[in-house]
Image (cartoon, rainbow, N blue to C red):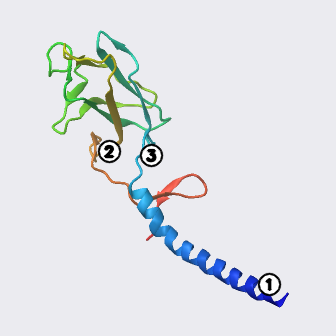
Amino acid sequence: MKRIEKYGKVIAMLAAALGMTAALTIESSMAYFTTYVSAGGSGTVSLGAQTTIHEDQVTDMTKHISVKNTSDSNECFVRVKIFCGEEFKIGYPKEPDVIANEDWYFGDDGYIYYRPVLGPGELTTVLDAKIFVPEDFGREDFNVVVIQECTPVVYDESGNASADWNAVYTDYQVNSGGQGEEAEE
């Protein structure tokens, strides 16, 4: 009986030591695994204005894109960027690189911007993006990805609206009441 008690204590001590060693290595193991994990889908970060994209309709290889401001009280500016394989070309009806709708314009950064301020509940005018598929393209399906972003409207002292696409919101947290506030340092 003494022998069982003696070995039982040794086994318990070994199990505790093994558990503590495992606990110490979990953080570095998790860092390794999270470094190499791929992600898919999308996530939403809300800093006031919220928008949704409508791009489901495609006719005659033209994607019809619009964005709706779904927030209750915040105005915003909107921009989109269109990605496709290098074998495809995206054009904008009328001429290959000219947008027919004057509300949308090309930026120097590859984005297409919506010129007017988008009020709460409002929908942008439609941006038509024509997809040119090579004649020798062998597949029937492919992806054209449209990314949309919005930023809150910033007004200067004179009441002129502008967009700050480089704004970084780093010290923002949500308190228990559900309202955002700046983090204390």
- The residue identified by callout 2 is 154
Q: Give the mark nearer the N terminus: 2 vs 3.
A: 3
Q: Distance between the residues labelled 2 and 1?
A: 75 Å
- The residue identified by callout 3 is 45
Question: Horizontal and vertical percent for residue 154?
Answer: 32, 44
Secondary structure at numbered mark 1: helix
Residue at the farthest right position = 1
Tell me where residue 149 sits by quadrant.
top left
**Is the C-beta separation of discs 1 and 3 under 8 Å?**
no
Secondary structure at numbered mark 2: strand
Position above or below: 8 against 143: below
Q: What residue type is labelled 2?
A: Val
| Residue 183, visible in the rendered structure | no
In what quadrant of the picture does the C terminus appear? bottom left
Judged by depth in the image, the label closer to the viewer, 1 or 3, is 1
- The residue identified by callout 1 is 4
Q: On the rendered structure, is 25 left or right of 15?
A: left
Question: Horizontal and vertical percent for residue 68?
Answer: 42, 27
Q: Distance between the residues labelled 1 and 3?
A: 59 Å
Judged by depth in the image, the label closer to the viewer, 2 or 3, is 3
Position above or below: 100 against 119: above
Depth check, front residue: 8 or 66 = 8
Q: Give the mark nearer the N terminus: 2 vs 1.
A: 1
Q: Mark 2: few, some, or many residues within 10 Å (few <14, many ≥20)?
A: some
Judged by depth in the image, the label closer to the viewer, 2 or 1, is 1
Q: Mark 1: few, some, or many residues within 10 Å (few <14, many ≥20)?
A: few
Q: On the rendered structure, is 51 left or right of 77?
A: right
Q: Which amino acid does label 1 sit on?
A: Ile
